[in-house]
Image (cartoon, rainbow, N blue to C red):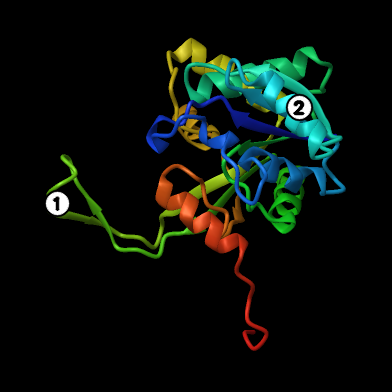
């Protein structure tokens, strides 16, 4: 079975608004619902779980009913960090009866333009190799800076991957990784892929992502999201 685990435990402080960014509306629909619809519409997703910011669980359930999200099966409590939220989600899935071999697509609630092709590729690659990380090759020139203002060092971009979500794993592998992290004192890795990298000896296979699969973190991101949602590819483009 294949399940989406949507991480919506953050308060969105960087957005600087009165409500969490995942619940802000775009085209009269909350961002998190746009995200959930991508999984709702995919035939190979068998259920959706959301790790939700405390106090917003009832709101989420109401929106899911309003927008006919029939695959929403579980809502788990968010953690203090993203890593803790993921841990809450995977242990919640285990307690709910999900199997170690089930595929878990861990996805940011605020990446609402996720394509069906990326979901399909994550499932296929994870089924084949055991791990699937959505990412795109870095196109920009990269500088390294200690203070954010000055730099004397560039980093070759040819080997750099900008990761996105979903990041897909078998449930048993995710749980084992978090248990190993607890033993090693790793408590705040920023993503599942960085956790796997910190633990070592895990080959992660890259699924091609998309520049459209943006993460809404700032007001500028919200403006870009709105523009992308209302833009269509010109018919003359190949």
Which sits in the foreground, 131 or 27?
A: 27
Would you say 53 lies left or right of 11 here?
A: right
Residue 33 image label: none
Q: Is residue 102 shown above or below 87?
A: below
Q: Is residue 211 shown above or below 232?
A: above
Which of the 4 quarters of the picture holds residue 47?
top right
* Between discs 1 and 2, the one toward the N terminus: 2
Secondary element type, mark 2: helix
Q: Is residue 88 shown above or below 214?
A: above
Q: Which residue is mark 1?
A: 151
What residue is rendered at 70% in x and 27% in y? Answer: 60
**Mark count:** 2
Would you say 53 lies left or right of 151 here?
A: right
What residue is rendered at 81% in x and 15% in y? Answer: 96
Which sits in the foreground, 151 or 177?
A: 151
Quadrant in which the N terminus appears: top right
Q: Which residue is mark 2?
A: 62
What residue is rendered at 50% in x and 48% in y? Answer: 163
């Amino acid at each position: 079975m294949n399940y989406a685990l949507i991480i919506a435990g953050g308060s969105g402080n960087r957005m600087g608004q009165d409500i969490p960014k995942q619940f802000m509306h775009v085209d009269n629909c909350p961002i998190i619902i746009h995200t959930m619809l991508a999984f709702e519409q995919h035939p190979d997703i068998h259920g959706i779980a959301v790790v939700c910011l405390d106090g917003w669980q009832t709101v989420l359930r109401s929106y899911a009913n309003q927008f006919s999200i029939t695959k929403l099966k579980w809502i788990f409590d968010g953690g203090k960090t993203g890593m803790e939220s993921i841990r809450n989600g995977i242990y919640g899935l285990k307690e709910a009866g999900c199997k170690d071999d089930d595929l878990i697509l861990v996805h940011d609630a605020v990446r609402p333009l996720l394509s069906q092709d990326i979901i399909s590729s994550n499932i296929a690659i994870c089924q084949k190799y055991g791990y699937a990380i959505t990412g795109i090759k870095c196109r920009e020139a990269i500088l390294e800076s200690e203070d954010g203002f000055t730099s004397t060092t560039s980093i070759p971009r040819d080997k750099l991957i900008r990761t996105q979500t979903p990041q897909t794993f078998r449930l048993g592998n995710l749980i084992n990784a978090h248990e190993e992290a607890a033993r090693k004192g790793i408590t705040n890795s920023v993503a599942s892929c960085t956790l796997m990298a910190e633990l070592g000896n895990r080959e992660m296979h890259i699924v091609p992502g998309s520049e459209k699969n943006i993460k809404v973190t700032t007001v500028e991101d919200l403006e870009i999201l709105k523009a992308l949602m209302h833009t269509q590819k010109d018919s003359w483009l190949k």
